[in-house]
Image: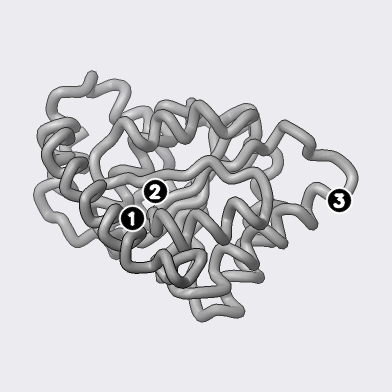
């Protein structure tokens, strides 16, 4: 699984710690983490939580990534932004139990973490335990186990609802302010990480045109 890490400006200085904890757990499960920044609060590109949602949608819809780890100070803004874009099913995760139940019941493709709330001494341990529970079992396994059929059925219904209520991403991109889209991807590492993994030529061509 290709996992994308996406951070906005207020939490950018935690990038190194978050990436280390996520990468260590992901590697143990055979996954690869792609760090899309922000990398520090001094980066030239300044991502907002709304941009987190757009970038997450770009990565998931083009299959450049299979799963996104994002967040903001409270985690709420990034979660709302992610779910406003097509192809993203994001959960707000505060602790390891949240992480496990989200993957087992909701089987989404993105999580948003509250990197400022309760993040103090031992904060990296909470991140580590969240990531451990996130990947401990195959997504959609169900909890409790006797509810698995109903939960899988509801997930399929939700996926169909999102197909109806969201337009294709290429249409969304063309309808958005071009400067907003350009600012979201305007980082040298984006091209290096994204284009070799992108599986949607139309979206790749549009982004390159910016």
In the rendered image, the residue lying farthest to the right is 121
Q: What element carries label 1?
A: helix
Residue linked to disc 2: 190
Report the side of 122 relative to 65 (left or right): right
Q: Are marks 1 and 2 in contact (CB under 8 Å)?
A: yes
Spot occupied by residue 184 in the image (x, y as percentages of width and height): 37, 33
Q: Which of marks 1 and 3 is nearer the N terminus?
A: 3
Relative to residue 29, is residue 44 depicted above or below?
above
Secondary structure category for the residue under label 3: loop
Q: Is residue 46 above or below residue 99?
A: above
Q: Name the residue under label 1.
A: 194
Can residue 139 be seen in this snapshot? no
Between the C-alphas of marks 3 and 2, the distance is 31 Å
Count residues near mark 1 (Cα–Cα under 10 Å), then give few for <14, some for 14-19, many for 20+.
many
Q: In this view, does 20 lie above or below 162?
A: below
Q: Which residue is drawn at 89% across and 45% down?
A: 121
**Residue 84 picture location, percent across and down:** 31, 31
Q: Residue at x 75, y 53 (%)?
A: 126
Residue drawn at x 30%, y 55% is 155
Residue at the disc numbered 3: 122
Left or right of 54: which side holds 22? right
Lower position in the chain sequence, tag 3 or tag 2: 3
């Amino acid at each position: 699984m290709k996992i994308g890490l996406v951070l906005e400006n207020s939490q950018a200085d935690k990038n190194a710690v978050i990436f280390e904890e996520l990468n260590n757990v992901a590697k143990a499960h055979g996954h690869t983490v792609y760090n899309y920044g922000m990398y520090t609060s001094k980066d030239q590109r300044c991502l907002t939580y709304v941009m987190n949602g757009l970038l997450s949608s770009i990565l998931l819809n083009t299959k450049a990534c299979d799963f996104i780890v994002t967040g903001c100070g409270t985690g709420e803004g990034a979660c709302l932004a992610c779910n406003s874009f097509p192809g993203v099913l994001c959960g707000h995760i505060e602790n390891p139990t949240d992480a496990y139940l989200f993957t087992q019941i909701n089987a989404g493709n993105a999580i948003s973490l509250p990197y400022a709330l309760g993040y103090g001494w031992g904060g990296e341990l909470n991140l580590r335990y969240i990531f451990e529970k996130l990947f401990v079992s195959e997504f959609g396994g169900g909890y409790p186990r006797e509810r698995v059929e109903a939960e899988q059925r509801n997930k399929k219904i939700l996926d169909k609802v999102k197909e109806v209520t969201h337009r294709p991403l290429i249409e969304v991109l063309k309808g958005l302010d071009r400067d907003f889209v350009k600012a979201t991807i305007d980082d040298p590492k984006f091209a290096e990480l994204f284009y070799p993994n992108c599986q949607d030529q139309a979206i790749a061509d549009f982004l390159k045109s910016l």
